[in-house]
Image (cartoon, rainbow, N blue to C red):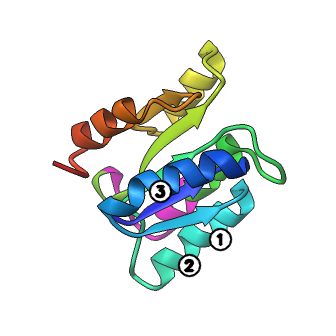
Amino acid sequence: MKTLIVEDDFTSRLLLQEFLTSYGSVHIAVDGKEAVDAVRSALQSNKPYDLILMDIMMPKLDGHEALTQIRKIEAQNHLVDADQVKVIMVTALADADNVIFASQNKVQGYILKPYDLNKLLEELRKLGLIS
């Protein structure tokens, strides 16, 4: 599983990176702009991500806008739903507006901070990314 963690908080990035390394390669982006660039580069090299864990509140480009741009890049590359990267939003924001936005942008999961790693494992299994 090739994963991109998009998180501006160092401690959160480190926790997720250490946890997910045993399941495959893990790349890091510290803001939404880096995430968009990473996805574009991965698609150009024909090595797309299987999973993105995306924080919402980040500098430069928030998670919502980054996800919107990522979905546009996928559409430009003729990727249909089944071929698109699976995205789990990881955030402290549980309000209805954020949940609705996530569902409209084909987000497969929504995990609240502080991270519950068992919940993350459950989401990865539901998505068929791990057994």
User: Where does label 2 land, which residue?
Assistant: 41
Q: Can you say which quadrant of the picture contains the N terminus?
A: bottom left
Task: Give the Cα distance between marks 2 and 3.
Answer: 23 Å
Task: Give the Cα distance between marks 1 and 3.
Answer: 23 Å
Kindly indicate whether the residue at mark 1 contacts the one at mark 2 (C-beta within 8 angstroms): yes
Q: Position of residue 128 (x, y in %)?
A: 21, 47
User: Where does label 3 land, which residue?
Assistant: 18
The amino acid marked with disc number 3 is: Glu
The amino acid marked with disc number 2 is: Ser
- 10 Å crowding of disc 3: few (<14), some (14-19), many (20+): few
Residue 109 quadrant: top left
Tag 1's secondary structure? Answer: helix
Visible in this render: residue 28?
yes
Q: Position of residue 97 (x, y in %)?
A: 64, 19
Q: Position of residue 94 (x, y in %)?
A: 60, 18
Q: Is residue 24 magenta?
A: no
- 10 Å crowding of disc 1: few (<14), some (14-19), many (20+): some
User: Where does label 1 land, which residue?
Assistant: 37
Q: Earlier in the sequence, mark 2 or mark 3?
A: 3
